[in-house]
Amino acid sequence: MAKITFIDSNKIEITVEADSGSVMELAVQNGISGIDGDCGGVCSCATCHVHVAAEDMDKVGAANEIEQDMLELDDNVNEFSRLCCQIQISEQLDGVTLTVAAE
Amino acid sequence: MLEHTQNQTCVVIGASHAGVNFAFSLRKQGYAGNITLIDIDPTLPYHRPPLSKAYLTSDNDIASNALKAADSYIKENIKLMLGTKVAKIDAEHKHVIMADGTNIQFDQLVIATGARPFIPPIEGLTTASNLYPLRTAADVTKIKTALKQSEHKRVVIIGGGYIGLETAASMQKLGAQVTVLEREERILARVTAPEMSSFFQQLHADNGVNVLTSKNVASIQTNNGHNQVICADGEQFDADVIVVGVGIRVNSEIAADAGLTEDNGIHVNESAQTNVKNIYAIGDCAYHYNPHFARFIRLESVQNALDQGKVAAANICGKDTQYDTIPWFWSDQYDIKLQMVGLSQGYNKIVKRTEPSDNHKFSVWYFKDDELLAVDAVNNAKAYVLGTKFIKNRSKVDKQKLADLTVDFKADTLVIN
Ligand SMILES: Cc1cc2nc3c(=O)[nH]c(=O)nc-3n(C[C@H](O)[C@H](O)[C@H](O)COP(=O)(O)OP(=O)(O)OC[C@H]3O[C@@H](n4cnc5c(N)ncnc54)[C@H](O)[C@@H]3O)c2cc1C
Ligand code: FES
């Protein structure tokens, strides 16, 4: 089980638990505002953009190549940016905080 | 919140990509009245693109593909009426009539009825065994069950468009022996350049899928549950399962009956509004104007469904908004990720750029004289992103540099000022 905290687009903090699937799926299942997941999780739409808390970057890992390129479509990109459909849930993610990138 | 909408009702026919996202946008824009989403499909609304891709090959429940969680509809006070068919629209009296005769009054109506698979008039098709289109979650369940139960797992796919080819790749992954029959001289003939067609033809061959072109299916003979697919040139193929993917028909009959202008889709203006006030049409069913390409079109894509939904929602909430976007689309087959942006129709010059890579990484750039119209990017999100920006900004791209791998692949070096 991993406990993941989202700070949604209304700045509301929500902590949820899961043991598998992608972080985007988890966010949609829990109605996290600001995570749309329009392409269904195949890194094609960039509507699942989050900023990883600086101290959690090691746990979450950096964006892959396609993800980095896709993130360039978003003005809000920074070194903590991830498209969360590309983050798979595992024990390792326990305790991380992800802030929904503003639109 | 918009006070004046408090006692109003917005009815949406069709709860898929367009309808569902419209409903949530409408709430977000401040609509305070009732929002009712109606769909024939009994399943909690789900993503369609994975049906021919990841969902077909996985054992996941359709719930993992839901567009929104069931709770989200409750939270946003959006009423879902699933398994319900709208039989008629009474535009004059502003109500929709269900198949069971009940009716619902509306102040605004949004038609998001999308499309259904076209079933070609092929002799023997309706009596063939295990023959299915692929548009709904239920179709996928039937296809998977038929494949599981079949001993030889010989699959014939009629139609070499994106859905046919994705289904071929997925069924191959499931252990089927797949043949694709395409009527045209090349696959994807209507949507891409010959370079892309031959790439995908080779890709499928490399993965053991038999893709045959200029194969017009003339008839299907079925004996004891065993199908023979017979082409006009006489060639025959054994098939335990047949998937038909030869295009769609727009679900516009109820709109036409209600007197809405309709022809290759329901005609809408730049605000997604039909010729009847307070009735909008969005998504696959909407024939609309694209300002960037200065042309009327109908698109079948998630992007179009979502963006038109947003435009309709804003306009209903009194914010004058026009639909003006650059179309984009994707397709995943095997380990190939294809991303497309723009509309290539009318191109007269192509530039192909192949990156040094062990995993087919290239892009095809479509120009009309000096204007960049579209980009097809294979395993190359960077090309897709650059293409998107160039098309949006109407940047003039140096074609020679674009094809030259020694030139840096970025805006500064490629755009002519
Ligand atoms: C297998 C497959 C793969 C695809 N892959 C991609 C892809 O990779 N990328 C991409 O961008 N697009 C893809 N598409 C296209 C994309 O799914 C469509 O463009 C999108 O679904 C359009 O959404 P829509 O809401 O306009 O229409 P639809 O999804 O067609 O939904 C219309 C809904 O209206 C309902 N309806 C119709 N008439 C009535 C009625 N009278 N009463 C009640 N309900 C009614 C239907 O049941 C349906 O649920 C794919 C489509 C399919 C089928
Ligand atoms: S869901 Fe589309 S990029 Fe993540």
Image (cartoon, coloured by chain):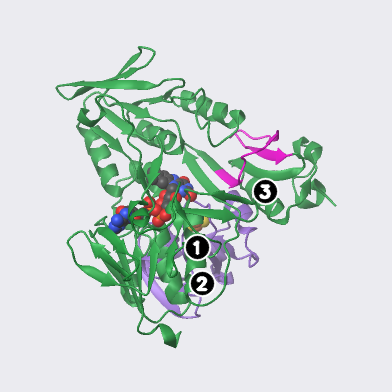
Chain colours: A purple, B green
- The residue positioned 46% from the left and 21% from the top of the image is B213
State yes or no: discs 1 and 2 in contact (Cβ < 8 Å): yes
Q: Quadrant of residue B54?
A: top left
Image x and y of residue B306, in percent: 48, 60
Alpha carbon distance from label 3 to label 2 = 30 Å
Relative to the observer, which residue lies in front, B263 or B390? Answer: B263
Q: Which residue is mark 2?
A: B315
| Residue nearer the viewer, B161 or A49 | B161
Task: Name the secondary structure under disc 1.
Answer: loop
What span is in magenta? B339-368
Query: Is the residue B76 above or below the residue B404 in the image?
Result: below
Q: Is residue B75 above or below residue A74?
A: below
| Most foreground residue, B407 or B194 | B194
Contact between labelled residues 3 and 1, with CB atoms less than 8 Å apart: no
Q: Please name the amino acid that badge 1 sits on.
A: Ala
Disc 3 marks which residue? B387
- Residue type of the residue flagged with mark 3: Gly
Amino acid carrying label 2: it is: Asn
Lower sequence index among marks 3 and 2: 2
Q: Position of residue B411 (x, y in %)?
A: 76, 51
Q: How far, Cα to Cα, is label 1 from label 3?
A: 27 Å
Label 3: which secondary element: helix
Neighbourhood count class around disc 3 (C-alpha, 10 Å): few under 14, some 14–19, many 20 upward: many
User: Relative to B241, does residue B406 appear above or below in the rendering?
Assistant: below
Say whether residue A90 is left or right of residue A7: left
Along the line of sight, the residue nearer the viewer: B94 or B343: B94
Q: Position of residue B321 (x, y in %)?
A: 57, 69
Q: Earlier in the sequence, mark 1 or mark 2?
A: 1
Q: Tell me the subunit letter for badge 1.
A: B
Instruction: Determine whether the residue tagged by mark 2 lies in a helix, strand or loop.
Output: helix
Q: Chain of mark 2?
A: B
The quadrant of the picture occupied by the C terminus of chain A is bottom right
